[in-house]
Amino acid sequence: MSSSEHGIAHVHRDDIGSRLGMWLFLFTELILFGGMFIVYAIYRFTHQQEFHLAAKELNTLFGTLNTIILLTSSLTMALSITALQKNQKGLSIFLQLTTIVFALAFMVNKFFEWSAKFHHGLFPGSDVLMEKSNGEILFFGLYYIMTGLHGLHVIIGVVLIGTMTYFTSKNRITSDNYVRLEAAGLYWHLVDIIWIFLFPLFYLIT
Amino acid sequence: MENHSHSEKHTPHYGIYIIVWLALLILTGVTVAVAGIDFGGLTVATALLIASIKSYLVLTIFMHLKSESKVFSIFVGVALLFLLISFVLLFADYSFM
């Protein structure tokens, strides 16, 4: 037992390097979404009135509710790392699971929101949409691709955090080796930041 | 300096995260409330300013940039600078077309 512990102590670990690597990955995400925000900015600049008109179709209540859900999930994610640092494994697992529940709640909201849009015939390529002005078609195209890609990130985040919860329960993530949980946390907070910008730009420009 | 940041890591607190979370919720309330008011050209600027403050709080506290070594902040700064350059160049192009 003591010899195996001795062996573990000599395994090379570079937590700062790991976190820096995660940040570098996040920069590629920044470029991915950044490119889309540039497209949004240009089209909004060239089609101001149509964008305002189209944004009226979006439900601010859904958007606000999802913002609160995502901000709170970011809190529970950050707290789960603190809990593990304080060697409170059970609390950390509970907080990680809470984060996942909030993420799923976000997606359920998104499902109802998109369903309502589809019900009104507002989806890419629909007859209702194609009869609208160019600017409105562009707005809804950007709305679906940007919130859709963001939603995909939420789903990936659920899988990622779920994996970390499994690792924590199996003691593969512990109070003195939690860099993977930190990396998952960084990813989750980035997803939150992207929503912080998506929310006012799509839901609040009426 | 190294020792200082190391010891900081060993005394983690829940309080700061809850304060930041409350601040984020308040800022969300503000951004929804002022969205109804027409500031003309400043409406977008106001929304983006509030979103930037919220992002700053998430980056520094939730993502620990404040307690990480300076290298992290420099990296993030450079990444954001290049994104800003892309925006400025494209808008410069569109404005003079």
Image (cartoon, coloured by chain):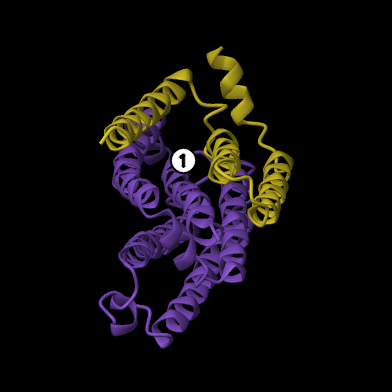
In this view, the residue in front, B30 or A3, is: B30
Give the residue displayed 47% in from the left and 54% down from the top. A198
Q: What residue type is labelled 1?
A: Asn
Quadrant assignment for the C terminus of chain A: bottom right
Give the residue displayed 45% in from the left and 52% down from the top. A191
Q: Which chain is yellow?
A: B
B57 up-or-down from A167: above or below: above
Tag 1 residue: A177
Q: In the displayed image of the protein, which residue is found farthest to the top? A: B1
> How many residues crowd mark 1 within 10 Å: few (<14), some (14–19), many (20+)?
some
Give the residue displayed 34% in from the left and 74% down from the top. A132
Q: Position of residue B17 (x, y in %)?
A: 67, 43
Q: Where is residue A140 in the image (x, y as percent from the top left)?
A: 36, 67
Dot 1: chain letter = A
Examine the rendering and report whether any part of residue A135 can be seen: yes
A159 up-or-down from B6: above or below: below
B96 up-or-down from A179: above or below: above
Give the residue displayed 39% in from the left and 63% down from the top. A143
Q: Where is residue B40 in the image (x, y as percent from the top left)?
A: 59, 45
In which quarter of the view is residue B13 placed? top right
Quadrant assignment for the N terminus of chain A: top left
| Left or right, residue A131 beside residue B37 | left
Q: Position of residue B53 (x, y in %)?
A: 60, 37
Q: Colour of chain A?
A: purple
Examine the rendering and report whether any part of residue A1 can be seen: no
